[in-house]
Amino acid sequence: MDLYYKTIEFLEVHFFSGYNVLNTLIYSLILILIIFGLIKLFKKLEKNPEELIFYLIPFILTGSLIRAFVDNNILLYSWFLITPGIYFIIGATAIISLLIGIFLEKKLNINYKKTLISIGLILLIPNLILINRINIIPILEIVTVWIILTALFFIIGKFSHLYKNKNNLAIISAHLFDGSSTFVAVDLYGFSEQHILPNFIYKETLTALSIFPLKIIVISLALYIIEKYVDDDTIKGLLKLSIFILGLAPGLRNIITLALSI
């Protein structure tokens, strides 16, 4: 019994009480293993994951809504309803939905992407109904910053091959959205950053504006490397899809949390 209670205590301290170096490394390792598993899955299915970037948005929004509902006590706290638990569940749901879509495509000739987004929307609707209040001000602030920055990269795309690609533009836009929501939440409303590295950077620079050059450099470099050195379409597509989700999901969670809590 002592071992049982010590194990529970260890998990509570290191995994269920916010982010720390240990669980960040463990979650990163799990993400890498999941990506390798998904590469094999998509190769077997003969589908390019990059094609799913826009069709997975309802699933991403559902996960972000549930996470924000926990933040605002609309749903009771549970590890399975916060990051990363909720995204493991939503990810598994999306994969099952994808498999259902591919099955129906083979049997009934229904485009699998239509089935995927339909299931995502069905899951999203009940969560939208749970919204009982909303503050439009932080939404307008975030969206204004995001639109200005995305427009800048849209213009850059006219001269740069990297951002002429609509999916690459969507990826940097997703991270600019996350950056905009973080900047507004931290600098304008006094929220704190949960992740270790960004929190350190914000404290050193005294502003969450530092998130923008950091994200632009890292994401642009990642996309450049993927485009130039990754020849396998499945690996390339899955890397892009993963980067897109890692930007959009926390951005949506931030904007929803602000809109519901202020």
Image (tube, helix red, strand yellow):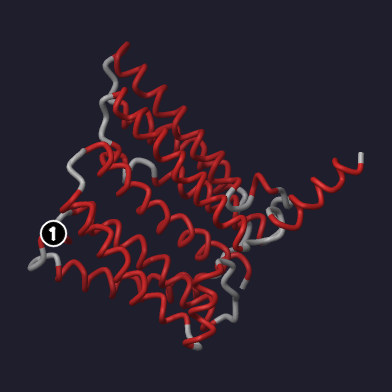
Residue 249 x, y percent position in the rendering = 46, 55
**Position of 223 relative to 104 (above/below):** below
Residue extending farthest to the left is: 159
Label 1 belongs to which residue?
164
Q: Locate residue 31 relative to residue 145 in the image: left or right.
A: right
Q: Residue 226, position in %: x, y? A: 23, 52
In the rendered view, would you say 94 is above or below 148? Answer: above
Q: Residue furthest bottom?
A: 206
Name the residue located 7 percent from the left edge and 68 percent from the top edge: 159
Farthest front residue?
A: 3
Residue at (36, 63) in percent of width and height: 175
Quadrant of the image for the N terminus? Answer: top right
**x and y, in percent, of residue 66 in the image:** 59, 50
Q: Quadrant of residue 70?
A: bottom right
Element type where label 1 sits in the image: helix
* Residue 211 drawn above or below residue 64: below
Q: Position of residue 248 (x, y in %)?
A: 41, 57
